Image (spheres, coloured by chain):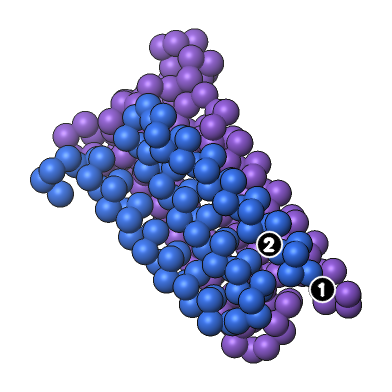
Chain colours: A purple, B blue
Amino acid sequence: MSVNDWVTLGLIAFGVFFMLVADIGLNRMPDLYTRMHATSKATTLGITSLLLAAAVHFGTPEAITRSLLVVLFFFITAPVGTHVLARAAYFRKIPRWRGTVLDELVGHYDPETHELESYEESVSEAGLQEHRHPAS
Amino acid sequence: MSQLLNGVLLILFIAMGLCFIRLLRGPSLADRVVALDQIAVHTVALATVYCIAVEQVVFLDVAMVAALLSFLGTIAFARYLEHGRDV
């Protein structure tokens, strides 16, 4: 096996390791928000190193451009998708883990229009105090 | 090399099975959407490793399309979760 093959295999092993870790986290974490935190490792580290492995293995311009395009696409869409989903779950009042200590969004979302209030409004209302989650 | 990559594909399939456990267990709809998103990520990973295993660059296009579709699916599900039927 050449150096190229070894680099490819190393990147694949790295990526698959993180995919597995993310799946174990998806099953073991206590609530939705921590599960989303676990799965984001698979999309960033896992997929990126697998696609880089493909780019290193082929080494042709078409393979490299396609790999980097997919990586770029994941880096743009993964935070957007995670944010939209977490936001929807927050409005749905999906139960949190009982060990959650801080919810900084309490009272800052308009329940009717689903709009986040501006920084000036929150300063004038609360004086920047911390909102504690009732469970703590 | 080819034997090793077959093993990697097997590991990825097992990892995908772990996602299906979360998809079945729930408990909320949002958890299932997260699991579905994760399954789509695994599809992209499988397509990438497969394209290395069979030496065909064409399968990278499959990965690209799977990534696009999974993003649209997640956004649509999230909109439905947030606004209900009147999206």
Q: Which residue is mark 1?
A: A5
In the image, A17: left or right of A32? right
In the image, B62: left or right of A106? right
The chain identifier of the residue carrying mark 1 reads A
Q: Amino acid at mark 1?
A: Asp
In the image, A58: left or right of A94? right
Residue A135 is situated, as x and y percent measured from the top left of the image, at 44, 11
Q: Residue at x 67, y 88 (%)?
A: A60
Characterize the local packing of mark 1: few (<14), some (14-19) or many (20 or more) Cα atoms within 10 angstroms: some
Q: Which residue is mark 2?
A: B6
Q: Residue at x 55, y 28 (%)?
A: A29
Task: Kindly indicate the quadrant of the structure image that contains residue B46.
Answer: bottom right
Q: Residue at x 25, y 48 (%)?
A: B79
Residue B9 is situated, as x and y percent measured from the top left of the image, at 63, 58
In this view, the mark in front (1 or 2): 2
Characterize the local packing of mark 2: few (<14), some (14-19) or many (20 or more) Cα atoms within 10 angstroms: some
The chain identifier of the residue carrying mark 2 reads B
Q: Is residue A45 visible?
A: no
Quick one: A3 or B68, which is closer to the camera? A3
Q: Secondary structure at mark 2?
A: helix
Residue furthest toward the right? Answer: A2
Q: Secondary structure at mark 1?
A: helix
Residue furthest toward the left? Answer: B86
Q: Is residue A80 above or below residue A90?
A: below
